[in-house]
Image: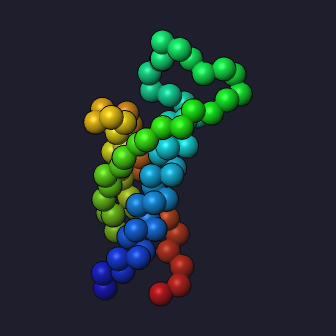
Amino acid sequence: MSPSPSSIVRLLLALLLTAAAALVAAPAHASARPAAAGRCAPIEATGTGQDLGNGQTTATVSVDGQVVGTTRATFTITGS
């Protein structure tokens, strides 16, 4: 049984949001003008991922075409 398109979209959205949160929390590189302490800076990140099956996923996250990180996640599948 293949996952439905809506479950794939939800999975990719969850991966992208997780990756974006990780990038904001721990930037991969320094900036010439660092943000003030306690402030968040919006970023536009893209992610390309793969569903490895059995709730396992992996993705590559990029900002302006530059790879800034990767993700691995495990989801608990519930329902049908």
Q: Quadrant of residue 65?
A: top left
Q: Position of residue 4 (x, y in %)?
A: 36, 80
Residue at 45% x, 26% y: name it.
Answer: 28
Residue at 67% x, 29% y: name it.
Answer: 39
Count the marks: how many? 0
Viewer-side residue, 67 vs 79 = 67
Q: What colouring method underlies this structural image?
A: rainbow
Residue at 66% x, 20% y: name it.
Answer: 36
Q: Position of residue 52 (x, y in %)?
A: 32, 63
Q: Is 34 located above or below residue 23 in the figure?
A: above
Q: Is residue 56 left or right of residue 48?
A: right
- For the N terminus, the image quarter is bottom left
Q: Quadrant of residue 35?
A: top right
Q: Position of residue 55 (x, y in %)?
A: 43, 67
Viewer-side residue, 28 vs 57 = 28
Q: Is residue 7 left or right of residue 37?
A: left
Q: Is 72 located above or below residue 30 in the figure?
A: below
Q: Is 51 located above or below residue 79 in the figure?
A: above
Q: Quadrant of residue 50?
A: bottom left
Q: Is residue 70 visible?
A: no
Residue at 43% x, 41% y: name it.
Answer: 44
Q: Position of residue 75 (x, y in %)?
A: 49, 65
Q: Is 32 located above or below residue 77 in the figure?
A: above
Q: Is residue 75 left or right of residue 63?
A: right
Q: Is residue 29 visible?
A: yes
